[in-house]
Image: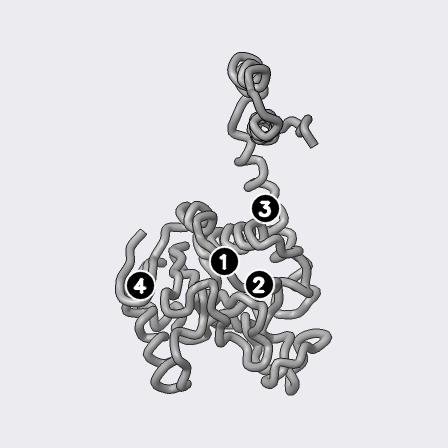
Amino acid sequence: MITKGKFLLLDCAEFRSWLSKQKITRVINKLQVHHTASPNYTTRKMLKGIATQDHFACLEGMRDYHINTNGWSATGQNITVFEDGKIAISLDRDLNKVPAGMAGANTGMLCVEIIGNFDKGVDKITVAQKQAVIHLYACLVERLKIPIDTDHIVYHAWYTSKGVRLNDYTQGKSSKSCPGTNFWGDGNTIASAKKSFLPMIKDELECLGKEELKMKKEDTNAIIDKYLKPAWGAAKTAADKQEIGRLADELRVASGQKKQNG
């Protein structure tokens, strides 16, 4: 985890823990999916699958373009995913700030930019980036309680330049082809999103849920029987008993058991 200038750079494995510690004060009910188009694998100067351009140089280049060319107040996206799986947080456009990802349709949304140009015949997404993207979206839907469907995880290509939602990617009406006509190896249509991108997020979310089951059932019940039940019996107020019961249920849930106290 490295902070430099207006950006925080994380390893993919650090993102979920970092996200769990963030205080989110605005309503976020949709997640945008973008490719950067430029920068891309060529501008990142890929050599044998590894970019030679510094991550922060790439990020600062985007920020400079967004501010000095587009006239925005800060970096457009909230989050950026690199080809090596690194994840960058825009500190000048943190999670509590509305992004500038899609004109006319940013309220209530979070903007994620995936480095690369995923139109047909250009960049082929790396395995590391693919894994990081899926993990990122799974963590976001877990934290923000967002449904995994095409109404809530949306491609830029499904909107007009004025932010009107279309029924699908439509050449001549869609603002852009973003996240690319060969995104994920499937394309940028609603059908393509349903084919593998969204199902992979669902699978990753399920894996995250399994990771939460870190305690053994036997250990949980031993702690409850040896420590919490005597404490409950010795508690002098209803509030104390209720709190001990809540703690016991938290342990039960962590070991895959059902709550017993409401």
* Disc 3 residue crowd, few under 14, some 14–19, many 20+, Cα 10 Å: many
Q: Secondary structure at mark 2?
A: loop
Residue 184 visible somewhere in the drawing: yes
Distance in Å between CA atoms under marks 3 and 2? 18 Å
Does the residue at mark 3 contact the one at mark 2 (Cβ under 8 Å)? no
Q: Identify residue for label 2.
A: 28
User: Residue at position x 29%, y 55% from top?
Assistant: 2
Instruction: Select label 1 or label 3 by which is in front.
Output: 1
User: Which circle marks residue 205 in the picture?
Assistant: 3
Lower sequence index among marks 3 and 2: 2
Above-or-below relation of 182 to 208:
below
**In the image: residue 56, left or right of residue 103:** left
* Disc 4 residue crowd, few under 14, some 14–19, many 20+, Cα 10 Å: some
Q: Secondary structure at mark 3?
A: helix
* Disc 1 residue crowd, few under 14, some 14–19, many 20+, Cα 10 Å: some
Instruction: Select label 3 or label 4 by which is in front.
Output: 3
Q: Position of residue 28 (x, y in %)?
A: 57, 63
- Location of residue 244 (image quadrant): top right
Does the residue at mark 2 contact the one at mark 1 (Cβ under 8 Å)? yes
Q: Amino acid at mark 4?
A: His
Q: Secondary structure at mark 4?
A: helix
Q: Amino acid at mark 3?
A: Leu
User: Which circle marks residue 55 in the picture?
Assistant: 4
> Which one is nearer the viewer's eye here, 143 or 119?
143
**In the image: residue 18, left or right of residue 47:** right
Instruction: Select label 1 or label 4 by which is in front.
Output: 1
Above-or-below relation of 216 to 133:
above
Q: Identify residue for label 1.
A: 24
Which quarter of the figure is the C terminus placed in? top right
Q: Position of residue 80 (x, y in %)?
A: 43, 64
Lower sequence index among marks 1 and 3: 1
Q: Amino acid at mark 1?
A: Ile
